[in-house]
Amino acid sequence: MNISVELTLTPIQENYEPAIVNFIKKMRESGLTVKENPLSTQVYGDYDEVMGLLNREIKNAFEAIDRGLMYVKIVKSDRSEYAADF
């Protein structure tokens, strides 16, 4: 089963950028389809692969920050080819 996940890591601290950059780099290194925009990162792939990656890397990201939020949206389908038609 394929899923699409939208993620936004929001460290609540000074010097927040390194944590975000590191998290995005870990997503890129996964071998899964990853897309980024200024507000979020999207990861696409097999449910077990994506969720395994997120379980590991969200924990790592939280361990690297003092306080923070992770916004996660999950869709049961691969939306990586989506393009607006308007």
Image: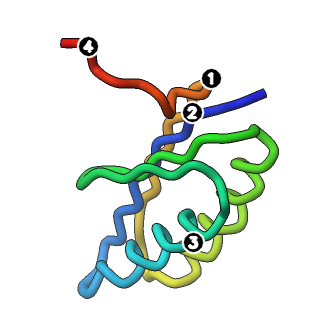
Q: Quadrant of residue 53?
A: bottom right
Residue 74: give its label: 2
Which quarter of the image is occupied by the C terminus?
A: top left
Residue position for label 3 = 26
Report which residue position mark 1 lands on.
77
Q: Earlier in the sequence, mark 4 or mark 1?
A: 1
The secondary structure type at the circle numbered 2 is strand
Q: Disc 1 versus disc 2: distance between alpha carbons?
A: 9 Å
| Residue 47 vertical placement versus 20 (above, below) | above
Asked whether the residues under the numbered discs 1 and 2 touch, taking CB atoms below 8 Å apart as contact, a structural biologist would say no
- x, y percentage for residue 60? 62, 76
Q: Which residue is mark 4?
A: 85
Is mark 4 in CB contact (under 8 Å) with mark 2? no
Q: Amino acid at mark 4?
A: Asp
Q: Is residue 60 left or right of residue 18?
A: right
* First-in-chain label (1 vs 3): 3
Q: Earlier in the sequence, mark 4 or mark 3?
A: 3
Mark 3 neighbour density, 10 Å: few (under 14) some (14–19) many (20 or more):
some
Position of 85 relative to 25 (above/below): above
Q: Residue at x 77, y 50 (%)?
A: 49
